[in-house]
Amino acid sequence: MIKYWGNVEMRNQAQIRSDFLVCCWTGFVLVAIYLPIICSALAGLSKSRYFLFPVREYSMNWWERTVSSVEVQILVQNSLKIAVLVTLISVVLAFFGALAFARYDWKGRKLYQKLLLLPIFFPQTVLGLAMLLWMNALGISPSWKTAVVAHLVWIVPVVTLIIAIQVYNYDPSLEEAASDMGASRLFIFREITLPLLWPGIWSGALFAFLLSWGNFPLSLYTTGADSTVPKWLYSKMVAGYTPMVPALGTMSTLAAAAFLLVGWVAIVTLRRKKAGK
C-alpha cells in the first residue's frame, strides 16, 4: 500500500512539473507574440515622432490625427468594402463547395478537391502577380473590385476547408428522416442543414473577413490606385514614416480582437441555446 501511494505521489509531482512547464512555455509564446503589439501601441501613444523607450511623454495626438484623417477614412472604407464582399461571396461559394467536397461521392471528386486546394499552396505574392498579369492581358484596370476577385481565389479554398470540417461531422440521416416525414427540400435546408452547419459557416466568415482585411500581397498587386490599410502601412514604413502607422496598426489589431470576441460569444451563445432546448 505504501509503495502504491508513493507511486501516486510521484505521478502527481510529475504532472505538476509538466503543468508548470506548459504554463511557462505558454507564457513565453504569448509574450513573444504580443510584445511587438504592445510596443506598437506605445509608439502610437508617444508624443514624439519616433519611438523612444521608455516613453517620455504620452499623448493621444496621433490617435486623434488618425481618426480625423480623410486619407485613413478612405483606406478603411476600401478595406471594409473588400473584406465584406469577400466574406459574403466566399461563404456562399464555400458552403456549397464544402458539401461537394465532404458530403457527396461523385465522379471527379478527387480532382475537384485537388484543384480547389491548389491556390493555397501558391505563395500569395506569386498569386497576386499572376492575377495582375492576367488582368492586364484582359485589359482590366486594377482597382478594389479586382482585389475582391484576387482575394476570393485564395480565401474561398480556406473557408471551404473550414466549413468542410463541420460537414464531416454532420449526420445526413437527419435530412433523410425529415424527408421521409414529408418535409420539403427547402424546409430541410432551412431548418436542419443550415442550423447544424452554422458554427462552421460563422467560423469561415470570421476567417474570410480577417484574412481579407489584413491581406497585403494580393492587395499590393491588384488594388491599383485604390489603396488599403495594409498597403498604406507598408508604404509608410518604407518611406515617410509617421506615428499614425502604429496608431492605425493598433486600432486594426484591437478591432480584429473585438471582432473575434464577438464571433466567439455568438458561437457560445448559439450552442448554449441549443443545449437548453
Image: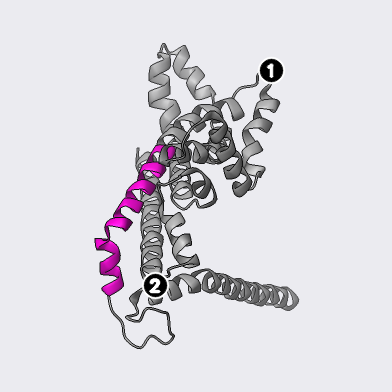
x and y, in percent, of residue 43 in the image:
40, 76
Element assignment for label 1: loop
Up-down relation of residue 82 to residue 184 (above or below)? below
Select label 1 or label 2 by which is in front: 2
**Residue 191 location in percent, x, y?**
38, 25
Label 2 SS = helix
**Would you say 103 lies left or right of 179 here?**
right
Answer left or right for 105 relative to 205.
right
Residue 51 seen: yes
Q: What secondary structure do most residues of the magenta stretch adopt?
A: helix
For badge 1, the amino acid type reads: Lys
The tag on residue 107 is 1
Bounds of the magenta span? Answer: 61-87
Q: Residues within 10 Å of mark 2 (few under 14, many from 20)?
A: some
Instruction: Name the residue beneath numbered marker 2.
Output: 41
Q: Residue at x 43, y 50 (%)?
A: 213
Q: Is residue 80 magenta?
A: yes
Of 129 and 136, nearer the camera is 136
